[in-house]
Image: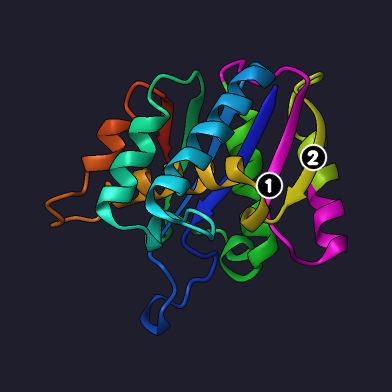
Amino acid sequence: MLVFIDESGDPGFKISKGSSPLFVVSLVASRKVEDSLLAQRAINEVAARFGIRNEFKFSQSRDEVRDAFFMALSSIDYCVRAIVIQKDRVYSSRLRTEKEAFYSYFVKTMLKFDNGLLVNAKVIIDGSGDQSFKKELSRYLKRHTGPGAIRDVRFSNSKNDRLVQLADMCTGAIARSYRDGRADAYRWRNMLSSKIEDVWEFK
């Protein structure tokens, strides 16, 4: 099993100075390697159709690209799970002041309460940061999930990984649905509805 993780928003709490009020982490899981290959091929075809040479990012994509992207993957077997954090509901002083602890805790929480999804999973997380943090996060996730759930944790630069880009697009679609007042708030989340297994709102 392959699992790809990405996030929307940032772990900061200085909302008045530009930190996001919302943080969303999502995973995209493929139970078969063949499905992952089909997804990569479909994403490459969308890129060729629209002349996209860089990576797909939800926040930077035009509406018609988002539509085409999710439509192209509609017949491919994958699932999405997410956790949504409204930061004003986080009271832990450690989570509010230590960005790495905040990120690790919510990724772990999403993976731990997976409803039995993860079996011998290879987890790929978007990231190109501090090596010591990545090693610690890998150990932390394996330690705090069930036995046999995670086989390996790796980090990948989204620029070179179509399936991390898929996780970005799915996370962005879910995060957009929490943008009150937007006429298109649920437009892409609705396109993902058949793939979404759970969106847990942290309280």
Q: Where is residue 84 in the image (x, y as percent from the top left)?
A: 43, 45
Q: Can residue 73 be seen in this view?
A: yes
Q: Which amino acid type is marked by label 2?
A: Val
In space, the residues marked 1 and 2 are separated at their CA atoms by: 8 Å
Span of residues in magenta: 115-137
User: Tell me, what colour scheme is on the image?
Assistant: rainbow
Q: Where is residue 195 in the image (x, y as percent from the top left)?
A: 41, 24
Secondary structure beneath dot 2 equals strand
Please tell me how crowded label 2 is: few (under 14), some (14-19), or many (20+) other residues with Cα within 10 Å: some
Identity of the residue drawn at 53% across and 60% down: 54
Secondary structure beneath dot 1 equals strand
Can you identify the residue that label 2 sits on? Answer: 153
Mark closest to the chain's N terminus, 1 or 2: 1
Residue 52 part of the magenta segment? no
Q: Where is residue 100 in the image (x, y as percent from the top left)?
A: 69, 62
> Which image quarter is the C terminus in?
top left
Is residue 163 shown above or below 172? above
Identity of the residue drawn at 55% across and 64% down: 11
Q: Which amino acid type is marked by label 1?
A: Ile
Does the CB distance between marks 1 and 2 fall below 8 Å? yes
Can you identify the residue that label 1 sits on? Answer: 125
Q: Is residue 196 left or right of residue 124?
A: left
Is residue 127 shown above or below 45? below
Question: Which image quadrant for residue 193?
Answer: top left
